[in-house]
């Protein structure tokens, strides 16, 4: 198993999130003093880590323990553009998207 100090990683992610300790504590349903205790832990209960992952929108299991690089839980990008119907056939699109855009 990988040698991980989960508490320091959580502390880093909280700082990156720009959340206050109070805001973070509220999101994971604990007291501020518990947050400082979490920062000192080398290991953590899985249910608590799930709440922390959801609060910080970061998959600690994949990134930390499984060493898989993942994106945040629900990061989505919306791209909007206009295409005249007559030009749809001339654009290199996946078939599924082409069917959605076609007036047929």
Image (spheres, grey):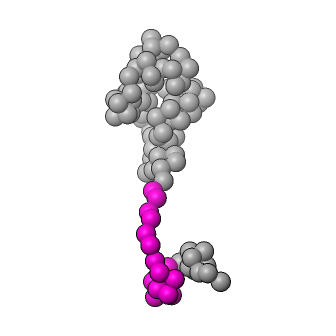
Q: Name which residue lies at 52% across and 25% down.
A: 27
Using the image as rendered, state which of residue 80 and residue 75 is in the foreground: 80
Q: What residue is shown at x 44% (from left), y 63% (from top)?
A: 79
Using residue 37 as the reference point, say whether residue 97 is left or right of it: right
Q: Quadrant of residue 32?
A: top left
Confirm whether the magenta stretch covers residue 84: yes
Total labels: the figure holds 0
- Specify the segment rendered in magenta: 77-93
Q: On the rendered image, what quadrant is the C terminus found in?
A: bottom right
Tell me residue 74's x, y (percent): 52, 48
Residue 7 visible (yes or no): yes
Give the residue drawn at x 51%, y 20%: 26
Q: Nearer the viewer, residue 80 or 27?
A: 80
Question: Magenta segment, principal secondary structure?
Answer: loop
Residue 52 image position (x, y, % from top left): 51, 30
Image vertical order of residue 91 relative to residue 58, above or below:
below
Residue 44 in percent (x, y) is at: 52, 26
Q: Residue at x 47, y 50 (%)?
A: 75
- Say if residue 65 shows up in the picture: no
């Amino acid at each position: 198993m990988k040698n991980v100090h989960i508490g320091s990683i959580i502390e880093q992610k909280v700082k990156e999130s720009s959340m206050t300790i109070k805001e973070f504590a509220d999101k994971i349903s604990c007291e501020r003093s518990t947050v400082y205790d979490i920062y000192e832990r080398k290991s953590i209960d899985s249910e608590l880590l799930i709440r922390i992952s959801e609060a910080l929108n970061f998959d600690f299991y994949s990134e930390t323990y499984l060493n898989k690089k993942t994106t945040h839980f629900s990061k989505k990008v919306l791209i909007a553009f206009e295409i005249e119907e007559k030009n749809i056939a001339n654009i290199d699109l996946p078939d599924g998207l082409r069917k959605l855009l076609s007036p047929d």
